[in-house]
């Protein structure tokens, strides 16, 4: 009983700390930029919609929608990574590493070029749908490879190669496009949270909330599956249906992130492991919301650096997340090597 009480206290403290970190980072992100806005003005503008017209315009038209988008998409990417690691029983699996984000990026670029080249707009639903198709195509290749080999190294190398191929094709399409609006896709193809509006937020919020609710509903069979497929079968889990749902949810979350922000590197790999260390458990019912909050906080922190470190020049979000995420991946790989020695 004492151990259970301590565990509950740890969970409560960790969740409270992550929520507080997200709130603070939201305020800092909204107040920081080419024009600094005082925290008091930010709170007044967000909660009461009062203040100078310039401040209200900056907060509600530019910084608040971007910050909300980073919160939603950062959490979605982290949860997608946790699901992929569960599915493949592979600690390095993630949307970016396995080439899933790159496949989604390629399909979105093709659709956007096809629409923009004809002078047509692209709705958020179309972008998410195109990204989902690309993510599923990449996932099929990864699944075929995983069925042929049990080697973690081979799976990762194949995923990275798929990512390189898709990224090369995307860069080729974007580079040789004639329309000036299409050429501007280059920033998106490198990963960026800029230019996201409230209409796009409504679409991503609906998709991510539905996926999160569904993932929490399957947290119990997910925990059984993490122990072993045989154990999951013994406790009554329909493995085929469970795997299909896990792949669909992880692919849809990764596709949503890529559709609006482009590829974001290493967050999907690093955050689930950091969450497990922070909460000292791998229980899906805890790690799913924990990864969401930690991923949101990390992405807001990285986006703040991307916007302000070399202002007015903005770095791609993947450049910053790689700085923090890549060392975690190296640490994971070294830890696995020590276990096998």
Image (cartoon, helix red, strand yellow):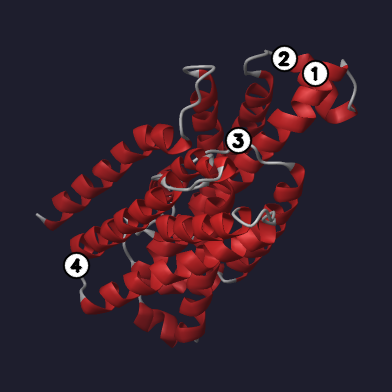
Q: Distance between the residues labelled 1 and 4?
A: 54 Å
Whole-Å distance between the Cαs marked 2 and 3?
19 Å
In-front residue for pair 138/320: 138
Q: In this view, does 296 lie above or below 272?
A: above
Pointer 2 or 3: first along the chain? 2
Q: Which of marks 3 and 1 is nearer the N terminus?
A: 1
- From the image, tell me which residue sits under label 4: 151
The reply, left or right, for residue 209 in relation to residue 287 is: right
Mark 3 or mark 4, whichever is nearer to me: 3
Contact check, label 1 and label 4, Cβ < 8 Å = no
Alpha carbon separation for disc pair 1 and 2: 7 Å
Do the residues bearing badges 4 and 2 touch, measured as CB atoms within 8 Å?
no
**In front of the other: label 2 or label 3?**
3
Mark 3 or mark 4: which comes first in sequence? 4
**SS at mark 4 in the image:** loop
Quadrant showing the C terminus = bottom left
What residue is pinned by disc 2? 37
Residue 327 locus on image (x, y percent): 29, 37
CB-based contact (under 8 Å), mark 1 and mark 2: yes
Quadrant of res 149: bottom left
Distance from disc 4 to disc 2, alpha carbons, whole Å, reads: 52 Å
For the residues bearing labels 3 and 4, Cβ distance under 8 angstroms:
no
Q: Which of 4 and 287 is in front in this view?
A: 287
Which residue in the protein does label 3 denote? Answer: 194
Q: Disc 3 on helix, strand or loop?
A: loop
Q: Where is residue 118 in the image (x, y as percent from the top left)?
A: 64, 57
x then y, percent, for residue 261: 55, 45
């Amino acid at each position: 009983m004492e151990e259970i009480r301590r565990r509950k206290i740890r969970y409560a403290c960790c969740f409270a700390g992550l929520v507080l970190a997200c709130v603070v980072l939201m305020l800092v992100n909204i107040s920081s930029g080419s024009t600094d806005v005082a925290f008091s003005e930010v709170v007044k503008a967000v909660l009461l919609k009062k203040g100078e017209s310039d401040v209200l315009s900056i907060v509600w038209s530019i910084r608040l929608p971007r910050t909300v988008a980073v919160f939603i998409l950062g959490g979605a990417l982290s949860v997608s990574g946790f699901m992929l690691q569960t599915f493949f029983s592979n600690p390095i699996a993630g949307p970016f590493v396995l080439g899933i984000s790159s496949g989604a990026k390629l399909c979105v670029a093709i659709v956007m070029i096809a629409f923009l080249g004809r002078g047509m707009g692209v709705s958020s639903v179309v972008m998410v749908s195109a990204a989902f198709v690309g993510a599923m195509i990449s996932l099929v290749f990864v699944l075929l490879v995983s069925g042929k080999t049990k080697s973690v190294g081979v799976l990762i190398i194949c995923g990275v190669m798929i990512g390189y191929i898709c990224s090369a094709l995307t860069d080729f399409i974007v580079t040789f496009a004639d329309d000036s609006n299409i050429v501007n896709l280059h920033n998106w193809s490198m990963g960026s949270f800029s230019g996201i509006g409230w209409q796009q937020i409504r679409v991503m919020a609906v998709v991510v909330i539905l996926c999160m609710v569904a993932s929490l509903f399957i947290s119990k069979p997910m925990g059984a599956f993490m122990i072993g497929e045989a154990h999951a079968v013994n406790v009554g889990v329909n493995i085929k249906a469970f795997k299909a749902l896990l792949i669909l949810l992880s692919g849809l979350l990764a596709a949503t992130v890529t559709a609006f922000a482009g590829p974001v590197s290493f967050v999907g790999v690093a955050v689930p492991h950091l969450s497990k260390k922070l909460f000292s458990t791998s229980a899906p019912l805890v790690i799913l919301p924990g990864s969401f909050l930690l991923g949101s906080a990390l992405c807001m922190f990285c986006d703040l650096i991307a916007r302000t470190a070399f202002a007015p020049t903005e770095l791609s979000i993947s450049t910053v997340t790689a700085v923090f995420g890549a060392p975690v991946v190296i640490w994971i790989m070294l830890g696995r090597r020590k276990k096998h020695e």
